[in-house]
């Protein structure tokens, strides 16, 4: 069972070795992950809401059909294989002070911690969990934070820590950082815009930690493990648009005015003069909260950033149009 990378690795090598493979994946697995796994010749079964339920199904299938269960993280051989990532990083950059690793079930970070600490005992290994799935943070620190919920980092959305991985993480990992969904989105967008690299939410968790808590890493030589690039195009597009909204490169506002011929044209022309690109416009007269002789114009524009957006809204206000900012959560109180 797997939510992505492990599934594709098992499918690839099973095909290479001529061994049939059946992969159990959660029902909500992104299409790109399931299709990539099928492309390697494996039989993909979508069953269970999460990895724990997939594990139950996989165990039943293995017992029923006499198959070997290849666990995605709680297996010493899997951990050893994943640990080679740490060896390769230190071979290329022996001066690293820290290695930052996303944590799901713990196989990747446990393997890297053992290998990296054996090579360079003073190195810090820092784990990163999605804030909605603080499984290791709970287990190690005796906390009882709730676990579960929709996350962009579905590849590390694991509710139960591994029997083999927990003691290794407890002994060798210096710190666990929890990151929120907004930080994960920012990290995915940063990889795409700054590095031209496609990262899924789980893969970008390390960068999310650096963006959320920069003081932990300032002045250190840091190695980030980008452990997955399986993200649906639609989801990536949504993340990128949301990041533009956070940076105020996309802004929405509403104008309420007396209805008269040419008003919409006036607004559109003025926005063009101010250098805004209109992405969407809605012209409404039929709402009960609008006077009978009134009209609302909802506009979404693309700008050069926060400063440019303020200039545009200030100019519209000076023109007597009174724009009111609208955000994804509804009408704001910011009136120009």
Image (cartoon, helix red, strand yellow):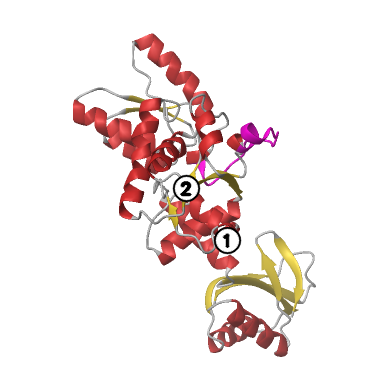
Q: Quadrant of the C terminus?
A: bottom right
Residue at x 61%, y 50% (from the top left corner) = 180
Ranked by sequence position, the earlier of labels 1 and 2 is: 2
Q: Which residue is mark 2?
A: 122
Residue 237 has which mark? Answer: none
**What is the x, y in percent for residue 130?**
57, 44
Q: CA distance from mark 1 to mark 2?
A: 21 Å
Q: Which residue is mark 1?
A: 214
Would you identify the image quadrant in which residue 14 lies? top left
Q: Predominant secondary structure in magenta?
A: loop
> Image check: 111 left or right of 91?
right
Would you identify the image quadrant in which residue 145 lies? top right
Q: Is residue 186 above or below residue 255?
A: above
Check disc 1 and report its element: helix, strand or loop: helix
Residue at x 57%, y 56% (from the top left corner) = 183
Q: Is residue 34 visible?
A: no
Q: Is residue 40 above or below residue 228?
A: above
- Which residues lie in the magenta part? 137-154
The residue nearer to you, when weighing 26 against 115, is 115
Check disc 2 and report its element: helix, strand or loop: loop
The residue nearer to you, when weighing 193 against 70, is 70
């Amino acid at each position: 069972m797997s939510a992505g990378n492990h599934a594709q690795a098992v499918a690839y090598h099973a095909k290479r070795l001529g061994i049939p493979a059946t992969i159990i994946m959660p029902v909500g697995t992104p299409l790109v992950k399931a299709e990539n796994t099928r492309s390697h010749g494996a039989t993909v079964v979508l069953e269970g809401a999460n990895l724990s339920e997939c594990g139950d199904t996989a165990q039943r299938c293995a017992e029923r059909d006499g198959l070997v269960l290849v666990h995605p993280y709680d297996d010493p051989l899997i951990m050893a294989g994943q640990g080679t990532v740490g060896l390769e990083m230190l071979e290329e950059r022996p001066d690293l002070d820290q290695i930052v690793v996303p944590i799901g079930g713990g196989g990747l970070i446990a393997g890297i911690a053992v290998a990296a600490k054996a090579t360079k005992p003073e190195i810090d290994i820092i784990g990163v969990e999605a804030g909605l799935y603080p499984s290791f943070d709970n287990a190690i620190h005796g906390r009882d934070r709730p676990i579960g919920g929709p996350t962009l980092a579905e590849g590390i959305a694991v509710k139960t820590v591994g029997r083999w991985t927990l003691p290794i993480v407890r002994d060798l990992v210096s710190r666990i950082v929890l990151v929120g969904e907004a930080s994960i989105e920012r990290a995915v967008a940063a990889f795409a815009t700054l590095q031209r690299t496609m990262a899924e939410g789980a893969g970008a968790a390390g960068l999310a930690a650096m963006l959320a808590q920069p003081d932990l890493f300032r002045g250190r030589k840091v190695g980030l493990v980008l452990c997955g690039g399986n993200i649906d195009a639609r989801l990536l597009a949504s993340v990128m648009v949301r990041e533009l909204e956070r940076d105020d490169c996309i802004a929405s506002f509403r104008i309420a005015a007396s209805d008269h011929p040419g008003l919409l044209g006036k607004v559109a022309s003025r926005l063009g003069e101010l250098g805004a690109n209109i992405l969407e416009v809605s012209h409404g007269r039929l709402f009960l909260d609008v006077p009978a002789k009134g009209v609302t114009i909802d506009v979404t524009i693309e700008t050069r950033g926060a400063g440019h957006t303020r200039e545009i809204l200030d100019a519209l206000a000076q023109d007597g149009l009174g724009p009111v900012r609208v955000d994804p959560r509804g009408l704001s109180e910011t009136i120009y």
